[in-house]
Amino acid sequence: MTTKPASLTKQRWPLRVVLLGVAASLLAVGANVTSLPGIGTPSGATSTHNGTTTTVAQGKHPPSNPNAPLVIPTTTSWPLRGCGIDSMAVTAHPSATRPIGKCVVLEVGDSLGNDVGWGLGRELGGYHDLTLVQKDKSDTGIATSWYYNWTQQLNKYLKLYHPQLVVFCIGANDEQNIKLKGRILTFGTKPWITEYGLLVSHLVALAHANGAQTLWLGLPVVEDPGYREGIELLNAIDRASSTQLSGTAFLPTWAVLAGPGDSYQQDGRIAGHEQDLRSPDGVHLSGYGEDVMATFVARELALIYHVNVKPERPVVLQ
């Protein structure tokens, strides 16, 4: 279960002030990431779908629209191994689609990842050549390796399942301090931002080194205002840090279940009826919310990678 850190109900910080330090801190992250093996420097391009422009650029130049996916294409030498998932198609053949092929998609994350994974299992269950491996762990995060080490776990899953794509949905438990070599890095400070960005980029680099492309899902809007500010900070870090290598993408989900002005909403209209979208805790997704989110992710997966895959029973908000 994803829980809000107890201190967040009392803690408030001006988000704009905190975000001022993100850009400077992420420059340090980028400098370290460029030394990781396999970094690519693809040329920029864009493609438009459903009224949203998918920006294809180097990871250090995020698009101005925070609700648009950010895609860093693969190189021509990417090992596809019979799988059709290949972000190079965004630039090479922007209007073409091809069969999904025989693919393994590994989905990892926390309990919000569970929600997304369960929905994807229903929406993509009809594709027998597409194996979805869901390996989420509730109450975990990137910031607490002393409790659950995601680097070790991801490495194990990569060796065991050999996925062509890793989907990350994690971070809802990470609004807390980081312990680093006997030091305590306070959440939201510049040292914390820098370290967290490195943790994100290292997970992506690990998948990359094992021949997998990555799709990092941004976190959705949450109810509590203080908690929400922290989620926005995490999304900003994730967007910059998860798209430093070729074959990577960041997909924002904030607006998928949001109300007017990207505000939190508990209910939504589906097929002419009001339905719960979120759990009572204001964080997790209901069954309907899972299906709406999974429909969105499945459609974006098809658009980002230009593969012929559709949600089996699409559920959308009216």
Image: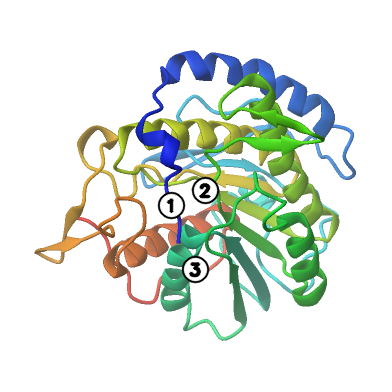
Question: What percent of the width, then of the height, locates residue 169?
Answer: 54, 55
Q: Which residue is mark 3?
A: 117
Q: Which residue is mark 2?
A: 173
Residue 256 visible in this rendered orientation of the protein: yes
* Callouts 3 and 2 close, C-beta under 8 Å: no
**Looking at the image, is mark 3 or mark 2 earlier in the sequence?**
3
Question: What percent of the width, then of the height, locates residue 72?
Answer: 68, 41
Q: Looking at the image, how many numbered discs can be counted on the residues?
A: 3
Q: Residue at x 69, y 23 (%)?
A: 191
Using the numbered discs, state the Cα–Cα distance from disc 1 to disc 3 in whole angstroms.
19 Å
**Looking at the image, is mark 1 or mark 3 earlier in the sequence?**
1
Q: Nearer the viewer, mark 3 or mark 2?
A: 2
Q: Amino acid at mark 1?
A: Thr
| Residue sitting nearer the eye, 301 or 204 | 204
Question: What percent of the width, then of the height, locates residue 123?
Answer: 42, 74
* Callouts 1 and 2 close, C-beta under 8 Å: yes
Q: Residue at x 65, y 76 (%)?
A: 101
For mark 1, give the secondary structure: loop
Using the numbered discs, state the Cα–Cα distance from disc 3 to disc 2 in whole angstroms.
17 Å
